[in-house]
Image: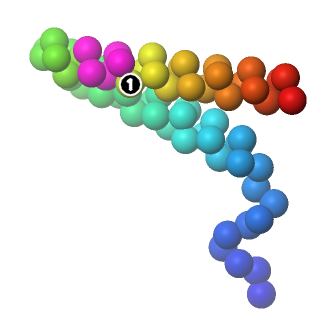
Amino acid sequence: KKSWLNPTINPMTLALTTFSLMFLLGLSGLTFHRTHLLSALLCLEGIILSIFIAFSLWVLQISS
């Protein structure tokens, strides 16, 4: 019987998937909340943070 939690999943893949979803969520928030400046700035901050973390993880993956 197979478990729903597969131990062979690469943690880096899971992290990059999480930050990709974070980026898309920020982008969709920016799309739908353009009328309010504060909401748009928070969405932009989330987008930039997800890009920074994803690139940091990418560099760590390449260097190891």
Residue found 30% across the figure and 27% down from its top: 29
Q: Residue at x 83, y 24 (%)?
A: 62
- Position of 39 compared to 57: left or right? left
Could you tell whether 29 is left or right of 54 in the image?
left
Q: Looking at the image, which residue sits at the far left? A: 36
Indicate the position of residue 2 as horizontal and vertical percent values. Answer: 76, 80
Secondary structure mostly taken by the magenta-highlighted segment of the chain? helix
Residue 24, picture quadrant: top left
User: Which residue sits at x=61%, y=26%?
Assistant: 54
Q: Quadrant of residue 47?
A: top left
Q: Is residue 1 magenta?
A: no
Q: Which residue is mark 1?
A: 46
The front one of 24 and 57 is 57
Position above or below: 22 against 63: below
Instruction: Say whether residue 43 is magenta.
Output: yes
| Image quadrant in which the N terminus is located | bottom right
Judge whether 48 appears above or below 58 on screen: above
Q: Position of residue 7 (x, y in %)?
A: 77, 65
What range of the chain is rendered magenta? Answer: 41-45
User: Could you tell me residue 11's position as x and y percent?
Assistant: 71, 48
Asked whether 52 or 29 is in front, the reply is: 52
Apparent side of residue 29 relative to residue 35 in the rendered image (left or right):
right
Looking at the image, how many numbered discs can be counted on the residues? 1
Seen at 40% across and 33% down, the residue is 25
Please identify the quadrant where the C terminus is shown. top right
Residue 28 as seen in the image, left or right of residue 56: left
The disc labelled 1 sits on which kind of residue?
A: Gly
Q: Is residue 33 above or below residue 1?
A: above
